[in-house]
Amino acid sequence: MATGAHESVFNDVRDWLLAGKRVWLSTITETWGSSPRPAGSWLAVSSDGDWSGSVSGGCLEEDLLNRCVAGGPEIPRFIDYGISDHDRDQFRLPCGGRIRLLVEPLWPERDLPHVEAVLEALKARNPVARIVSLGSGIARCELADTRQAGITVDAQVLRHGLMPEFRLLLVGAGEVARYVADFARAADFSVTLCEPRPTFSEGWSHAGLPLVQALPDDLVSRSFNDPWAGVLALAHDPRVDDMALLAALNSGASYVGAMGSARTSAERRERLASLGLAQEQLGRLRAPIGINIPSKTPAEIAISVVADLIAARHHLRVARPSL
């Protein structure tokens, strides 16, 4: 199972701090014009030159690596890229683009407890906010909610709201599931494949995507029942898909979708209604799943599905009301 970008970077930071290394964490705080990475993106660099994360398409990372390994700042420091024509030429920023970063030093003894607290909150599927003193560099964390996602900076502190990784449960082994998994993981989703049918599970041969042979309703209730979870019924078998959808539409999962034609989707809604689902619950079902490209091949269907997932995740992250 893949790990979300922030969690992955902080796992590396924790390992470096445990090894006694100093670390500098660069956070994009603002962007203007075109920029390859959004505000909140991280690049962590250790005193040995190890690095994790990304704050650009590659043009800024080398400069930040060199700065930190040569001796990064002792207190949080803002660095601006793309202000001058020289910056744009040297770092190949898009014309008119500008990025502001906060480079934050981390020490093993002082900052390891904070890093572990953030990781513990994210592992428990709780939104968490990092609050960093711009004067001292001392950071603390507190539980947050979806209304507090993103970056805010004032004269004294940086506040960075972090959301749990978005987990996907793909139900039904097949070519569509394989492509959805590949594209979704590249877009920073965590992916689990579930296949309860022995014929399909025993013949699954894609080593890069492990398969869990279990009933999908059990997995939904155990691990995919919060707002940062999605359940995708891709088996094309009502015995399997309906079991997953019944559980998912009764759960807190924010994204529930099923593959099939418009006619198949209408018949599915009738079956689910006969099994006791209310219209409000059925209204949450995205079927046919994905955006209307139109798509035909497994790869095209997967692209349409992941595009819709990205849009849904974005709306979840910027939502104002609490879920």
Image (cartoon, rainbow, N blue to C red):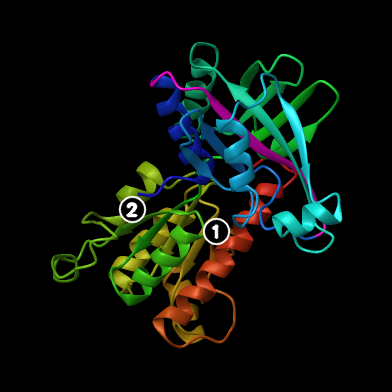
**Residue 277 seen in the figure:** no
Cα separation between marks 2 and 1 = 16 Å
Q: Nearer the viewer, residue 80 or 269?
A: 80
Q: Position of residue 220 (x, y in %)?
A: 38, 50
- Secondary structure beneath label 2: helix
Q: Nearer the viewer, mark 2 or mark 1?
A: 2
Q: Is residue 82 magenta?
A: no
Residue at the top extreme, as displayed: 109
Q: Is residue 229 visible?
A: yes
Left or right side of 171 for 83 = right
Crowd tier of the residue under label 2, counting other residues whose Cα lies within 10 Å: few below 14, some 14–19, many 20 or above = some
Q: Crowding near pointer 1: few (<14 within 10 Å), some, many (20+)?
A: some
Question: Is 76 in front, or is 243?
Answer: 76
**Residue named by callout 2:** 217
Q: Quadrant of the C terminus?
A: top right
* Amino acid carrying mark 1 in the image: Gln
Give the residue at x 44% y 82%.
264
Give SS at disc 1.
Answer: helix
Identity, as a three-letter code, of the amino acid under mark 2: Asp
* Range shown magenta: 19-33
Query: Does 178 appear above or below 14?
Result: below
